[in-house]
């Protein structure tokens, strides 16, 4: 018994120590959160002066919410220290809530002040940024004459449609630089007038305009390099395409290969003669597409050559077999509607759907089509065989349902009409008829396999 009380005493001491740590933590957190509110309020005033009233709206709302919830933490702390005695559990719950509220307040204020930190830092550097915008504008403006000379030089070599993507870049860059310098002046004047929000908007517009102007001028220089690279690649692809044509002309000429050969020949013939201004980008794209089309057509023809095309007679036989299987299954199910379950009906419905899809695939009723194009025969045969298979499954399931639904021998004995344990139905009845139907379908399938 002494050991039990000793253990209980140690547990109580540990819990008291934990409660003391939690109480100390709650007090420290409350002081820190209160100080953080004061500091953030000062930051809000500064941020509003730098960025404007609307820009600091989220921080203002967060600060108001924190003050409201921190009031609850102060009330809980007051309850912990009033004259009314509290249990250890009550103190523990209050201190835990105080810590939770203070941590939430710190996190929320951190999130909102971090979101404004970069903008505030940028606002503080506004004079430096304005000077940088003006320096960049001066530097970029000096590149405009060179860009215009580059456009003139390129115009002597490339077609107007090739230059359309960069021809107006120097003029657009000059307009953007003028707008950037004007916006920088607006930002400077608004800042001096204390209109910080408008000043910041103007400064952002100036910075973005300078960036876009630099991108446009860079694009002119990049175009010249890319055009030369396209010309070099085009020459290599022309040589490769001519070699591909020589190989393709020796391949078996299916419809697809013949069309791809004609397309590539037309693309090569459309190339301008030497000395004519060209659009290497468009020509390269056109030739690549035609070359890839020929490769794909040859690959398809080789694959088809490795897999023989079924004769039309075999496809016709598969369609007729599907129609026979469907007709038998449809008749049996229709004649025993009350006995047929969902499985057989589902198979029959799927078989009929595939059969209708076959008609739509061929564009005419498959039973009357005079011939089927070689490219469509394999898929048509697969659809017909699938329909026949499902119809045969439907018939087998229907037969099972019919047999299970017939009246059974109430005595369980042998004999009956004709003996053999078939009391309640004569020998040679419905089951034998169904067996004959199934046997005929099996024999028909075997014969189909022989003909195929």
Image: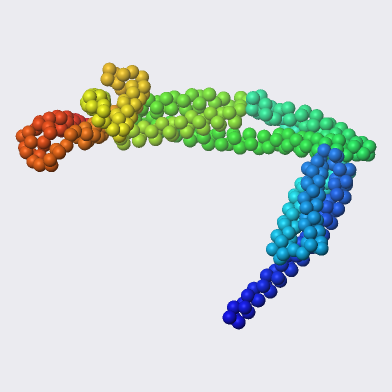
Residue lying furthest right: 193
Q: Is residue 412 left or right of residue 158?
A: left
Residue positioned 32% across, 28% down in the render: 349
The foreground one among 352 and 307 is 352
The foreground one among 199 and 96 is 96
Regarding residue 149, the answer to whether it shows in the image is no
Residue 86 to residue 195: above or below: below
Residue positioned 55% across, 34% down in the render: 235
Residue positioned 68% across, 70% down in the render: 15
Number of labelled discs? 0
Residue 198 to residue 70: above or below: above
Residue positioned 88% across, 39% down in the render: 196
The quarter of the rendered structure image containing the N terminus is: bottom right
Q: Is residue 404 left or right of residue 286?
A: left
Q: Quadrant of residue 53?
A: top right
Where residue 398 appears, x then y in whole percent?
24, 32
Where residue 356 appears, x then y in whole percent?
33, 23
The quarter of the rendered structure image containing the C terminus is: top left
Residue lying furthest bottom: 2
Where residue 195 appears, x then y in whole percent?
90, 37
The foreground one among 345 and 260 is 345
Q: Is residue 363 left or right of residue 24?
A: left
């Amino acid at each position: 018994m002494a050991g039990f009380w000793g253990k209980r005493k140690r547990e109580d001491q540990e819990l008291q120590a934990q409660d003391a740590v939690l109480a100390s933590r709650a007090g420290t957190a409350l002081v820190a959160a209160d100080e953080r509110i004061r500091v953030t309020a000062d930051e809000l005033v500064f941020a509003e002066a730098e960025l404007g009233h609307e820009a600091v709206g989220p921080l203002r709302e967060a600060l108001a919410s924190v003050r409201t919830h921190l009031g609850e933490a102060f009330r809980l702390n007051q309850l912990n220290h009033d004259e009314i005695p509290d249990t250890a559990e009550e103190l523990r719950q209050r201190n835990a809530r105080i810590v939770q509220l203070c941590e939430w307040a710190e996190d929320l204020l951190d999130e909102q002040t971090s979101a404004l930190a970069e903008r505030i830092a940028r606002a503080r550097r506004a004079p430096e940024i304005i000077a940088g915008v003006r320096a960049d504008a001066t530097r970029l403006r000096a590149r405009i004459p060179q860009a215009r000379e580059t456009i003139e030089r390129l115009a002597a070599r490339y077609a107007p449609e090739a230059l359309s993507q960069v021809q107006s870049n120097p003029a657009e860059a000059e307009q953007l630089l003028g707008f950037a310098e004007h916006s920088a002046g607006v930002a400077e004047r608004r800042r001096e007038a204390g209109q910080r929000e408008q000043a910041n908007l103007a400064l952002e517009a100036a910075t973005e305009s300078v960036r876009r102007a630099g991108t446009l001028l860079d694009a002119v220089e990049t175009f010249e390099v890319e055009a030369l690279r396209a010309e070099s690649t085009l020459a290599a692809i022309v040589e490769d395409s001519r070699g591909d044509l020589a190989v393709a002309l020796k391949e078996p000429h299916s419809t697809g290969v013949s069309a791809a050969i004609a397309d590539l020949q037309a693309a090569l013939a459309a190339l301008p003669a030497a000395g004519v201004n060209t659009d290497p980008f468009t020509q390269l794209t056109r030739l690549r597409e035609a070359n890839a089309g020929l490769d794909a057509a040859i690959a398809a023809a080789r694959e088809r050559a490795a897999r023989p095309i079924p004769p039309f007679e075999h496809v016709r036989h598969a369609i007729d077999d599907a129609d026979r299987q469907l007709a038998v299954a449809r008749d049996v199910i229709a004649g025993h509607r009350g006995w047929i379950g969902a499985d057989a009906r589902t198979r029959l419905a799927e078989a009929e759907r595939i059969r209708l899809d076959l008609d739509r695939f061929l564009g005419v009723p498959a039973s009357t089509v005079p011939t089927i194009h070689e490219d469509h025969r394999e898929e048509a045969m697969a659809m017909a065989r699938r329909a026949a298979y499902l119809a045969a499954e439907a018939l087998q399931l229907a037969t099972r349902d019919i047999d299970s639904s017939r009246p059974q021998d109430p005595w369980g004995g042998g004999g009956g009409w004709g003996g053999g344990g078939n009391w309640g139905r004569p020998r040679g009845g419905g089951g034998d008829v169904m067996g004959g139907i199934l046997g005929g379908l099996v024999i028909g399938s075997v014969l189909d396999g022989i003909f195929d």
